[in-house]
Image (cartoon, rainbow, N blue to C red):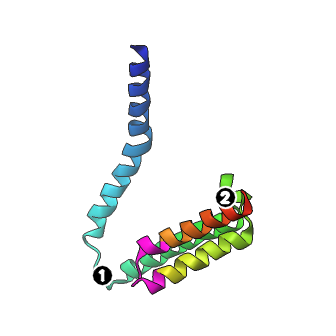
């Protein structure tokens, strides 16, 4: 019986410490975002910051990977990104197809290299 309580306790900790604090900020962002016009300077600034953050995360994953991704050669990681971007462009700017293509290239390359 104690196993169920420890599992429930772990779920509560994840909810209280991991989920709720970030959800408060998301809710506040939604409320603040309702007042921002689509063509305003603030909107363009937020879009630029979001794009810069995404570019930084991608650069970090490519150049300084951690965990299992660090085992993949740089050429394979770059090829997966290039293939994902090309697929994104070919399939009417579909993020789904871009992500799937990048994953298929990465996993396929890892299998071919025996990683």
> Which sits earlier in the primary sequence, circle 1 or circle 2?
1
Can you tell which quarter of the image residue 18 is in?
A: top left
Residue at the disc numbered 2: 69
Magenta: predominant secondary structure element? helix
Query: What residue sits 59% from the left and 70% below the top?
Result: 105
Provide residue 109's location: percent of width, then percent of height. 66, 67
Q: Which span of residues is magenta-colored?
A: 88-98
Query: What residue sits 64% from the left and 64% below the top?
Result: 61
Magenta run includes residue 73: no
Q: Disc 1 or disc 2, which is closer to the eye?
A: 2
Quadrant for the N terminus in the image: top left
Q: Name the secondary structure under disc 1.
A: loop
Q: CA distance from mark 1 to mark 2?
A: 37 Å
Provide residue 28's location: percent of width, then percent of height. 32, 57
Provide residue 14's location: percent of width, then percent of height. 43, 37
User: What label does residue 23 carry, if any?
Assistant: none
Provide residue 113's location: percent of width, then percent of height. 73, 63
Residue at the disc numbered 1: 38
């Amino acid at each position: 019986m104690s196993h169920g309580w420890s599992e429930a306790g772990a779920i509560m900790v994840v909810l209280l410490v991991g989920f709720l604090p970030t959800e408060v900020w998301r809710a506040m962002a939604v409320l603040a975002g309702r007042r921002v016009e689509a063509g305003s300077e603030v909107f363009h600034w937020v879009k630029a910051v979001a794009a810069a953050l995404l570019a930084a995360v991608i650069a970090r994953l490519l150049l300084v990977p951690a965990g299992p991704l660090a085992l993949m050669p740089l050429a394979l990681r770059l090829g997966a990104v290039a293939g994902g971007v090309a697929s994104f462009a070919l399939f009417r700017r579909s993020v789904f197809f871009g992500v799937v293509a990048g994953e298929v290239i990465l996993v396929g390359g890892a299998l071919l290299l025996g990683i």
